[in-house]
Amino acid sequence: MRKAVNMATPTPITIPTEPIGSIPRPLDLIERVARGDSEDPDLAPLYEDAIRDTIERFEATGSPVVTDGEQRKYHNFATYCVHGLPNTAPDGFKIAFSDGHTRRMSRLTRGPFRYRRYADCYLDVALRYAHVPVKQAVISPSALSLMYPAERIPDYSREQFIDDLLSEHEIEIRRCLKKGAHKVQVDFTEGRLAVKIDPSGHLLNSFIDLNNLALSRFSPEERRRIGVHTCPGSDLDSTHSADVDYAELLPSLLELKAGNFYIALAGEQDRRHALTIIRKYLKPDQRVFVGVIAPIDPHIETPEEVRDRVVEASEYIPIEQLGTTDDCGFSPFSDDTSTSRDTAFAKIQARVLGTTLAGTLIGAHQ
Ligand SMILES: [Zn+2]
């Protein structure tokens, strides 16, 4: 009896959908940056054009939430806040990708540790152009903790460094929240990488503990606007830790005191394996945005493919705790031209359309 009444009015469900962050920069900007100083004031109009065009094209996909495409992060998702600091050297932690290439972080040479810029400076510009909510990605304390050298710095202990790091990270998130970021997403790509580097799990646990020290500084209400992104890395169509079983990562990941999780899933070999783990460890106050688009796959997903991935995820995750996203940014390192802007926006449009299709389908069956 009750079921018959409910079936009389099928209502489409709105499933939240958000990007991760980066969009490939326009080729002329990449070439100009490669030729000279990225902070050359002559480049300012080119950056401004790139941001304006990115937001315009983002909004044209129908995406309810946009980013500035990280057109101006110097020069990747991880080190924008410390780029240009006088107390750093370029020979820091090395990230090895599966195709053999590496990316390198900078190394701290002396204290004290301070950010050179906070990510809300990007938000300032994006908000001038956007007509829909804008989210902002920031780098995690655990990634920046890799800047402190193993041999230690005289007169600046690791403990002092961690204190300064947590303060800077907290300031950055608070500034983004205050300026009205729809969400602040903490990029935690080194989570899965940590298991690859240290299969015992100690490194991952130390990263989780550190990031939880930061997240604990925020109220439950603030944490509803804070999320954490995990992925196996995505650069030059290659990954750094896709061979790490999600069973080694996800239970710890979901211990993080964040309200939202952006989990790469589209590119996984066995999505149901990952979804089974998420179902087991997900807490009632957490929302999971599952990746339904694989940025390193040149194939542009169809809306129907996306719809099917969302429906699959909804078999494991309560619909009120489900969202969709891309597996990663489309160019986390700013010089990556392996994906074109056209392809990135076509994939984003498929995510938006497919998520709507899924909401309609799931709504009709409830
Ligand atoms: Zn990512």
Image: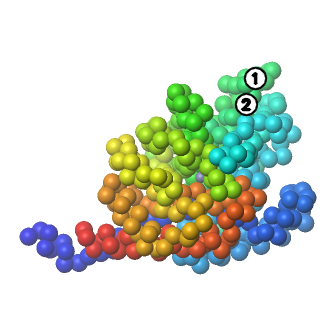
* Image quadrant in which the C terminus is located: bottom left
Placement of 61 over or under 218, stated as above or below = below
Residue contact at pointers 1 and 2, CB within 8 angstroms:
yes
The local crowd at label 1, few if under 14, some if 14 to 19, many if 20 or more residues have their Cα within 10 Å, is: few
Q: Quadrant of residue 165?
A: top right
Secondary structure beneath label 1: loop
The residue at which mark 2 appears reads as 148
**Percent of width and height locating residue 329:** 62, 58
Is 264 on the left-hand or right-hand side of 189?
left
Q: Give whichever of 99, 67 is nearer the camera.
A: 99
Viewer-closest of 137 and 280: 280
Q: What's the residue at 76%, 53% (across, down)?
A: 75
What is the quadrant of residue 68 in the picture? bottom right
Above or below for 257 versus 13: above
Neighbour tally class for label 2: few under 14, some 14-19, many 20 plus, Cα within 10 Å: many
Percent across and percent down for residue 57 are 64, 76
Q: Where does label 1 land, which residue?
A: 152
